[in-house]
Image (cartoon, grey):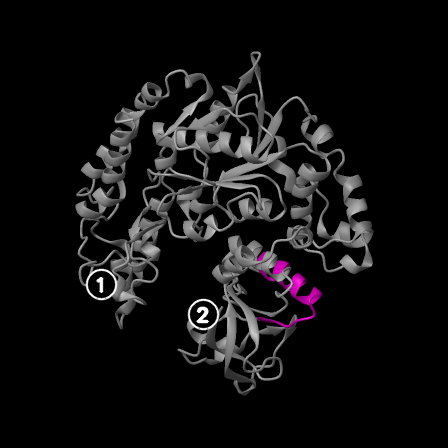
Amino acid sequence: MAQKTLRLPNASFNDEDTVYYMSAKHRGDMYHMRAAMQLPDGNFSLVLYETDWVNPKRATQDTEDYLARSTRRNERTTFFVPWKNEKVLGVKDLDDTDLNNCYVNGVKLELDAGQYRLMNVRVIGEGDSTERIRDADKTTQVLEKIREGMFLLQPTTKTYLNGQLENVFEVKWGVQLDKTKTTILAMYRDTGQNPGGAYPEFDTGNGIDVIRTIAGKVLHDGEPQIRVLSSGTEDGNQKPGIGFYWDAIPKVDAVKANGDKKDEDVTKRDIEAYFLYWASQVKPYYQMALGLRSGAMDLFTFMGIPTMSIGLRNMAGEDRHEMLAGKVFKRVNVQYDVPRHAATAYVAHKDANKFPDRKLDPMIYCPYWDQKAPGDRSTGSGANLVTNREPDLKKRMDKENSRKNKKRDEIDKIKAEMNTLRKKKLANFSVFDSYVLEVGLKVAWQKYAGGPTLVFSTKGDFPDVITTHVARFCYREDEATDPKNNMLSRKDGDLLPINVMQSELSVAEKTLRLTTDLFIKFYRKPFDDDWKEIEGS
């Protein structure tokens, strides 16, 4: 929680208030904020900026509706504005167009700049929300309140939905309950490649194929022990399973008409959340969920469903998502090493300018042009010494935007280049990263979904964040008679992508934008140290 100065309506807020504060565009983080609102000390008002009133599809409406509903239940105030962060903070002045589409508790405000003033308030952002969840006394009652808070439905409404959902799996999709196997719901994602989409690196790519291959090798008496249902994609003769669930579950109007009167403000996201909960915890069509890091993975986590969230080591935000890993939420985070998307590269650490003396290491971001390039760590300056990736799309865009007479054609050209790069096909997971996913899946299964022990570590107990480092010291159940040599058999597959990445540091279209020294620190030295330890064991 931080103290900030925000421009707020006089009639609705006061100095020293505490408010939740987030961009409405950060849809994936709304589940963290909604969960924080359920904590015993989580009852505060809500301020959302960058609300979208231009796009006819209202891209931010889900975030607004979902968070507003919980705020209303807590009898607090909502303030939604289309302003950029700088204007809410008072760094920039409002102009006449900024007075449109500003709402308090769903009521549009008058076009009067005089009703706003700068106030000193305590702010809870999305990162603060995650920290508050991590630090909370997570008693059974608190965990239940978080779980129920993800859908906030009365018993009568649940009863109605239960009846409507009963036939979705078996009648619509032909998926039966199977108590002989563990069923895993593998979430499919492809939204990152869309203009404005978040993290193209975390689109699924061949991820579900990798998981299916791993699952197909988990046998007992010759029979598969894991069944994989995938969403959003149909793979050969495999059932799409839960894939097209949003088309099958009741719509908001139907729930309002048939549910409890107290749920007349129900939102689409509430219904979706309850469906995912029902299909796992009420009718156990699946026992575990996995996918690339996303808001959906966090939703499963907050509802107490065993979860495996796949991320990229050193990617921005991984440290925050690690706060959710562990037995309380039955979650394992898995971090692979080799970036798969052409727009993934290193950027300056988010706190590099805030703490220049710390000389913070850069971190990965995708698309890289949304953040500052890595700077000179020896001085802490923002100078871009890593010029391999030229011409830098962000640098060219900033240059054009700074011109008094902007070249619209050039700006459109740069945007087109960005979108072309964003839409490039994901590379497959490397051979060793696929093994990291295998270790993560088996660890999550055996720790939190009731599976048998199928993977072991020479280091002893498994952490709840599985990285390349952790996986190097692991061996399968059928490798237990000779762990060392079986581990060593994977060394070449681990080394190959490291050699390739290092060779591409000077290739403009492919470089990670790292100096050789930093590449050695992040990749080469950990590889050498780990395999030296294994070989000497």
- Local packing at callout 2 (Cα closer than 10 Å; few below 14, some 14-19, many 20+) is some
State the image coordinates of residue 257 (x, y, percent, origin top left): 81, 53
**How far separated are the C-alphas under marks 2 and 1?**
28 Å
| Image quadrant containing the C terminus | top left
Looking at the rendering, the stretch of residues picked out in magenta corresponds to: 61-79
User: What residue is shown with label 1?
Assistant: 380
Of tags 2 and 1, the one toward the viewer is: 1
- Local packing at callout 1 (Cα closer than 10 Å; few below 14, some 14-19, many 20+) is some
Q: Tell me the residue at 48%/28% (across/down).
A: 211
The extreme bottom residue here reads: 114
User: In the picture, residue 95 is in which quadrant?
Assistant: bottom left
For residue 288, side relative to residue 22 (left or right)? right
Magenta segment's dominant SS is helix
State the image coordinates of residue 464 (x, y, percent, origin top left): 47, 41
Task: Identify the amino acid type marked 2.
Answer: Lys
Badge 2 marks a residue whose secondary structure is loop
Q: Earlier in the sequence, mark 2 or mark 1?
A: 2
The dot on residue 84 is 2
Badge 1 marks a residue whose secondary structure is loop
State the image coordinates of residue 281 (x, y, percent, origin top left): 69, 39
Vertical comparison of 503 with 409: above or below: above
Residue contact between numbered discs 2 and 1, judged by CB atoms under 8 Å: no
Residue 69 in the magenta stretch? The answer is: yes
Q: Tell me the residue at 32%/67% (across/down).
A: 354
Q: Is residue 187 visible?
A: no
Task: Identify the amino acid type marked 1.
Answer: Gly
